[in-house]
Amino acid sequence: MGGRAVKVRRRGSRVGPRRRAAFSLVRVGAGARAAKAYSVRIGAGALGLLARDLASGRLTSGRIPSQAAVVSDATVGRLYGRAFSRDLARRGLRATLLVFPAGETHKSRDTKARLEDRLARLAFGRDGVIVALGGGVTGDLAGFLAATWHRGVPVVQAPTTVMAMLDSAIGGKVAVDLPAGKNLVGAFHPPLAVYADTRTLATLPDRELRAGVAEAVKCGTIASASLFRAIERDRATILRRDPDAIARLLLGGARVKARIVTGDERESGRRMLLNFGHTLGHAVESAAGYRLRHGEAVAIGMVLECRIAVRMGLLAPGAAERVATLIAELGLPTEPPRRLRIGTLLAGAARDKKARAGVVRYVVPSGIGRHAGGGEFSVRVPGASVRRVLREAGLGD
């Protein structure tokens, strides 16, 4: 299904006896080698729709799953996991809530092993379904768990953060972190579907909201000038959580992500564009001991990587300033913590997944909504250029 067009439409779906909710629907064609495309449903009440669709067998070709394992961190498990699991049970589906400690530091092999032990005690078979209910950490961890349990069982992504709804839950990239770096052990395991219930954003802290918007800025900067302009226009109403502004943000980001993933499931080409801001962003995030949110680190990475593009003559200074200004106006950081060392960040960047034969390549914009590098989608950046930009940001060797 590679190259297949992405379809977006509004849909009325009954989630209760007296309530009809409208959902935005984005179709993702998961690549030529994938078994099928899948849908991203965004709207208030999507978790109720997911419970209905799971219990009826709608997501599993009419076959009702033998059981469901709902994976959540401790925070989301308390807020939504228990109620969602009870909803599944009321509909006749055997459901178990599997909870792990919240935080990026728990997106690890040790946490995955403990979850695997729980699945073993449940006698969780290939006819079960794993539901990843939470943010990006949960989606990555539960998705990788599903990818390797019995050599692969179905997973449904049920994101509860802005970042996960418009970015990380879409595309099937799942992984855990190592001490050496983020997402070094993982797989490509597309979900059966994505159900993004916007009601869960009511409990999302402001810091997490802003961090999620950073991923939308990434998509706009590198691939969609119209999305970037929409965020500039709506930035104040987004931060005030205006429902219409949030809906436009989520749908706009999901459409960009779906379009890119549809044409490049396994990150062999255009999908690399989604790593803009991540080469240095991941290095900053790891070096800071994950005390920064992922989106905050990506925001810093975008500013630094735009400065690199300016230094290399690939991006006009005004465009770089426009990106930095929007990031700052969204309440996101634009500079790395001064205590970080240049050598540490360069070593972290060298472990980036785009590195080939020891050469680090960066995804950088050539303008708002455009990328440099042509058909390679990334450019080779001399280490001296990166070092100079980091030194100008106030970091020492």
Image (cartoon, helix red, strand yellow):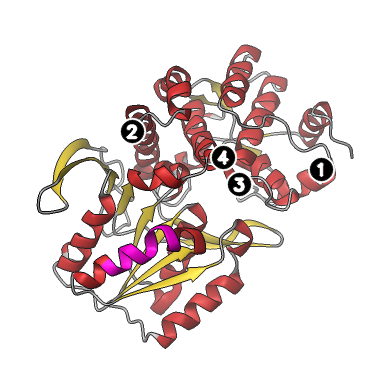
Q: Secondary structure at mark 4?
A: helix
Q: Which one is nearer the viewer's eye here, 392 or 89?
A: 89
Q: Residue at x 72, y 21 (%)?
A: 311
| Mark 2 vs 3: CB contact within 8 A | no
Residue 320 on image: x %, y %: 62, 19
Left or right, residue 145 beside residue 276: left
Rendering coords of residue 9 (x, y %): 19, 36
Q: Nearer the viewer, mark 3 or mark 1?
A: 1
Under mark 2, the amino acid is Ala
> Mark 1 to mark 2: distance in Å?
37 Å
Tag 1–tag 4 contact (CB < 8 Å): no
Residue most extreme to the top? 318
**Of tags 2 and 4, which is closer to the observer?**
4
Label 3: which residue? 354
In the rendered image, residue 15, in percent from the top left (x then y), is placed at 17, 52
Residue receiving disc 2: 247
Cα gap from disc 2 to disc 3, whole angstroms: 32 Å
C-alpha distance separating marks 3 and 4: 29 Å
Q: Please, what is the dominant secondary structure of the magenta stretch? A: helix
Q: Earlier in the sequence, mark 2 or mark 3?
A: 2
> Foreground residue, 77 or 185?
77
Q: CA distance from mark 1 to mark 4?
A: 22 Å
Name the quadrant containing residue 381.
top right
Mark 1 element type: loop
Please say if the residues under marks 3 and 4 sit with CB atoms less than 8 Å apart.
Answer: no
- Secondary structure found at label 2: helix
